[in-house]
Amino acid sequence: MATVHVTAPDGGYDIVIEPGLLSRVESWELHGSVVVVTNTTLAPLYGEKLAARLGAALVIVPDGEQYKTLEIVAQLYREFVSVGLDRSGTVIALGGGVVGDTAGFAAATYMRGVRLVQVPTSLLAMVDSSVGGKVGVDLPQGKNLVGAFKQPDIVLVDPSALTTLPQREWRCGLAEVIKHGLLADAALLEMASCSQNDTRAAAELVRRAVQVKVDVVQQDPFEQNIRAHLNLGHTFAHAIEQVSGYRWPHGEAVGVGLLAAARLSYRLNLCGASVPEQVERILKNIHLPHRLDNLDPQALYAAMATDKKWQSGRSRFVLLSEVGKAEIVEHIAPEYIISTLEELL
């Protein structure tokens, strides 16, 4: 078992990483009435058994990024009222990033906030979205435009759940692992080739990736400065998701977004050619997309204008000067961005 402690402004919490946690729910310390929120895919795999063993209500939402909406949040509010969740209760978000973000936002706002336990089941959620206290949903105009900061009571990570992930979902999570490696832990770039069926190796991969994010969010819990580095590749990625109608999964969009960020860094003479070459080589090795599949660069650039990371209409990108060193660059000429996108067609 590994435990990573997070210090947050309104109190700390632990991220517990332990194979078999989902089979030892009797040891979980929960408060008040409990609601397990999961999706239609995970309910028969884990959700029904977990709710039964906890004596909790089970709320099931549709599976997919297109359901990360205010409409689903309103559905959750109605379900919470129906099952009698009160201000002393606990919401368990069981699933990937969509479930964690949506259920987390509902927990942050229902009755002005109830307790939240994150139980991520995808690699992407384990290493990224369940950590750091950011929750929210999408609008038609852009991704994560409605949200809140909501620290969980605890994050419970069972790496054994990764063995049931579809390979595509595993690769999507590796995109965030690669991002963390590019930001602060180059060893993760080599570890990304590990097998999802090697639970011990996967647990160490998760622990190291989580530690990178924790180190950053503790310095900047409300994203005023250095925490923005965690958005490396994401300005491109969110545009890819939006323009594709969310046919591109988040992790695949992040992978191409990391390459686009590296290439833009090189185009602006911030880094040498070896940086984008290394990123592209890693993407190819783990079979993540490294091209845009004919998405329109002009449409992608237009979508970036609604990205919440842009400020006062000015472009704002996280770029690399080398592996392990990121910086924020603002007001980049549109032609540099569009040319970088055109290279990836």
Image (cartoon, helix red, strand yellow):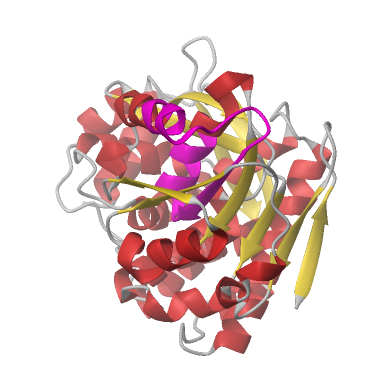
Compared to residue 214, the image places residue 171 above or below, namely: below
Q: Nearer the viewer, residue 250 or 1?
A: 1
Q: Nearer the viewer, residue 40 or 239?
A: 40
Q: Measured from the top left, where is residue 4 in percent x and y?
A: 79, 62
User: Magenta span covers which residues?
Assistant: 77-105
Instruction: Give the number of marks.
Output: 0
Compared to residue 37, the image places residue 235 above or below, namely: above
Q: Quadrant of residue 110?
A: top right
Q: Measured from the top left, where is residue 222 in percent x and y?
A: 71, 29
Q: Measured from the top left, where is residue 198 in percent x and y?
A: 52, 90
Q: Quadrant of residue 285?
A: bottom left
Q: Is residue 158 left or right of residue 307?
A: right
Q: Residue at (69%, 30%) from the top-left corner?
A: 223
Q: Residue at (29%, 63%) from the top-left corner?
A: 289
Q: Is residue 194 left or right of residue 73?
A: right
Whether 96 is among the magenta residues is yes
